[in-house]
């Protein structure tokens, strides 16, 4: 970017206060849910392997559609059995690609699903929940998630945050968590003057400075502001939760937007 901005304590405090409010309201994606479909929501909340597949689906499509993916896939296949997901790769690919397609990446995502099923069977004895078993450190869980095809830094950060904040998993070492380096998060951190440049390091450093004991707790609130208020064009500063604390650097935008396939939508 080349343009360095001063970091305001007031805007960091405003973001932290909004994060607390979002957490208190129990907001996940769509109000208190992951999707607009109650059965799909229950599926990702109660089946660890479905949650894992939901993380894989969270890529370049609206979050609500992504989290509905595992349940819709189970409907089409007639099962959500890890052994069959791993072995019957063509069936998984056909189910994802059948119209209306469950995902825009109809070749990559099914491959990740089958690969993840195989890894859970081999490494976790078929129990995806043991990836994030209670008492695990946040950094440890993120590392285990990153070992799956299709999960990088950003998705691992998002997933650990959801596990702690919304699924009540008892992970420790919250100070090692972080906001996901997502396009909405990046836009807010830049425009609010929280990060001096658009880089993973700058965003992480800013999140740790604002909330050293639990930087990942800023993730969802920031993402929601980016999606609903700090839009790429016509940002809604007048009703934004960061309000007057924000320097409103609305001319700034993340580098390479539209080229990073890891972004949530
Ligand atoms: S919408 Fe405006 S006030 Fe809100 S974060 Fe973006 S630039 Fe700041």
Image (spheres, grey):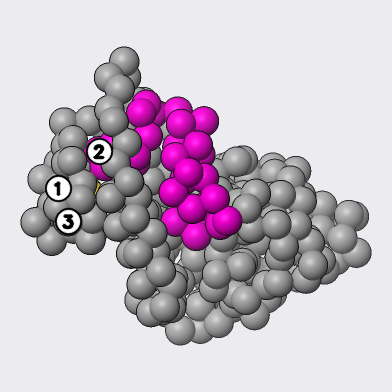
- Mark in front: 1 vs 3: 3
Mark 1, other Cα within 10 Å: few <14 / some 14–19 / many ≥20: some
What secondary structure is found at the residue carrying circle 2?
A: helix
Mark 3, other Cα within 10 Å: few <14 / some 14–19 / many ≥20: some
Q: 189 or 120, which is in the foreground?
A: 189
Residue under numbered circle 3: 243
Please name the residue shown 43% across and 72% down the image.
Answer: 23
Residue under numbered circle 1: 235
What secondary structure is found at the residue carrying circle 3?
A: helix
Q: Is residue 110 left or right of residue 99?
A: right
Q: 173 or 53, which is in the foreground?
A: 173
Q: Is residue 7 left or right of residue 155?
A: left
Q: Is residue 149 above or below residue 5?
A: below
Which of pointers 2 and 1 lies earlier in the amino acid sequence?
A: 2
Residue under numbered circle 2: 191
**Magenta part of the chain:** 189-218
Q: Is residue 22 magenta?
A: no
């Amino acid at each position: 970017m080349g343009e360095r901005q001063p970091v305001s304590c007031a805007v960091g405090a405003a973001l932290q206060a909004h994060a607390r409010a979002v957490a208190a309201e129990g907001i996940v994606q769509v109000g208190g849910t992951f999707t607009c479909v109650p059965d799909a929501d229950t599926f990702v909340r109660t089946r660890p392997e479905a949650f894992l597949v939901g993380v894989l689906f969270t890529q370049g499509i609206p979050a609500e559609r992504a989290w509905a993916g595992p349940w819709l896939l189970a409907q089409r296949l007639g099962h959500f059995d890890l052994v069959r997901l791993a072995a019957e790769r063509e069936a998984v690919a056909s189910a994802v690609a059948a119209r209306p397609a469950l995902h825009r990446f109809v070749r990559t995502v099914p491959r990740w699903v089958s690969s993840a099923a195989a890894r859970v069977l081999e490494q976790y004895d078929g129990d995806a929940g043991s990836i994030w078993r209670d008492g695990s450190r946040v950094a440890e869980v993120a590392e285990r998630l990153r070992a799956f095809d299709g999960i990088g830094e950003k998705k691992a950060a998002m997933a650990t945050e959801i596990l702690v904040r919304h699924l009540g998993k008892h992970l420790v070492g919250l100070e090692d968590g972080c906001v996901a380096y997502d396009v909405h998060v990046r836009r807010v951190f830049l425009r609010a003057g929280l990060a001096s440049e658009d880089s993973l390091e700058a965003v992480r450093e800013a999140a740790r400075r604002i909330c050293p004991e639990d930087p990942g707790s800023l993730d969802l609130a920031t993402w929601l502001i980016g999606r609903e208020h700090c839009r790429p064009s016509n940002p809604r500063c007048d009703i934004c939760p960061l309000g007057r604390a924000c320097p409103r650097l609305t001319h700034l935008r993340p580098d390479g937007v539209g080229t990073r396939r890891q972004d949530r939508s």
